Every structure is written in structure tokens, then in C-alpha cells.
Amino acid sequence: MSDTGPSPRVLHAMAYDQARGVTLLFGGSNDVSVNLGDTWAWNGKDWTKLSDSGPQPRRSHALVYDADREVSVLFGGSTGGGTPQNDMWQWDGAVWSSVGTPDAPTPRSQTTMAFDSARHAIVLYGGVSPQHDVLSDTWEYVCTPPCYPDLDGNGTLDLFDFLSFTNQFNAGGDSADCDASGVLDLFDFLCFTNAFNAGC
């Protein structure tokens, strides 16, 4: 589909960003084992370079999309001389930010993560330790999603949340399906109003 975009690489990570309708790619290693730290998005037709800043260049990391918070979350991987890390970062569609996790899993590369939508948690399994041990432990990261009526995420329920809901409704956005019926209709307006009046 395309011969332009990210440079040739291996051991990168990709995740589908549902909120923005793109597949996100971060890092990897080129053919001379130099780690990369660039971020790209594929929209189904073209690649766009989004950033050269954020996490340290790395390979063999994990990347997953958190549908509750509409961010992509990166964990671990090998940086520099091939040393596995246990740092965590999130991409909000514009910038990377470091996520402090005092009880994080031990450093590792080649780990796997998935988002459990029923339990609102990112689940991590296994990997390879700095001592090259193959790990078989399971971890989860739970981050409370924003209060539903607070659609603009500013921590306050106000007119802007009504405007955000209306815009999402008119655009056919998933966040406007308040009653989770799969259809946007008057019941969603009633559902949103009730949730707004109940507060967070």
C-alpha cells in the first residue's frame, strides 16, 4: 500500500488508536541494531510522522490502546545497550507523557499487553528480564476512566460537556451512545442528562 513512511525496522510496536482512527507505531531497531524513538500514524492510506520526542529510543516494547481514556500506553522494552526497562508512557494523540508507576512490573522486554474492556484494565504478561530469564508473571494496570458526563475531561460538569456531547452525537461518536444501545437517539440525550444531574 505504501513505500514511504517509517524507515525499515524490526521489534517495533503498533496499536490501533480508535479515537483518532489511526494505527500508531513507535520505535524499533534498524538493520544495524540502532534503537529508534520516532512515532508514526497510518490512516489506511498514508503514514504521518507525529513525533521524535517522548520515550527513549527502544525495541521489543509493548504498546496497547486504552479505550477508556483514549490513550495509547507503552511499557518497557530495551534501550541503549539492550537493557530492559520498566517505564511507562502514554500518547494522547498529540504528545507522549511519562506515567509514574511506583509498583510497576520489573524491567523487561518482549512482553505482551492487552486492554481488558470488561474490567477496565491493561493486562501485561511475561517478557524477558535483564538477566535473560523468561518471565511468566501477570500484572494489571487499572486507571479509573473519567466520569462519563465530563466529556471534555476538565474535572467540572458544565455547558462545555453538553456541547461536547452534542458534537459527538452529531458526528456519530461512540461516546454519545450513553445507553450503549448501539443507536444514537433521544434516549441517549435522556441518559446523558440523568448522568449529568447525578454528577461524578
Image (cartoon, rainbow, N blue to C red):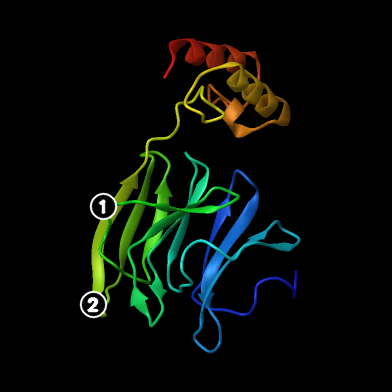
* Residue 75, percent from left and from top: 39, 60
Question: Which residue has dot 2 on it?
Answer: 133
Image quadrant in which the C terminus is located: top left
Q: Is residue 124 above or below residue 188?
A: below
Q: Is residue 127 above or below residue 9?
A: above
Question: Which residue has dot 1 on it?
Answer: 102
Q: Amino acid at mark 2?
A: Asp
Left or right relative to 25: residue 4: right
Q: Quadrant of residue 131?
A: bottom left
Report how far apart the C-alphas of labels 1 and 2 lie in the structure: 23 Å
* Residue 22, percent from left and from top: 64, 53
Neighbourhood count class around disc 2 (C-alpha, 10 Å): few under 14, some 14–19, many 20 upward: few
Q: Is residue 10 above or below residue 43?
A: below
Q: Which mark is residue 65?
A: none
Q: Secondary structure at mark 2?
A: loop
Q: Residue at x 39, y 70 (%)?
A: 77
* Residue 17, percent from left and from top: 58, 50
Q: Residue at x 66, y 21 (%)?
A: 163
Q: Residue at x 25, y 64 (%)?
A: 106
Q: Amino acid at mark 1?
A: Pro
* Residue 133, percent from left and from top: 23, 77
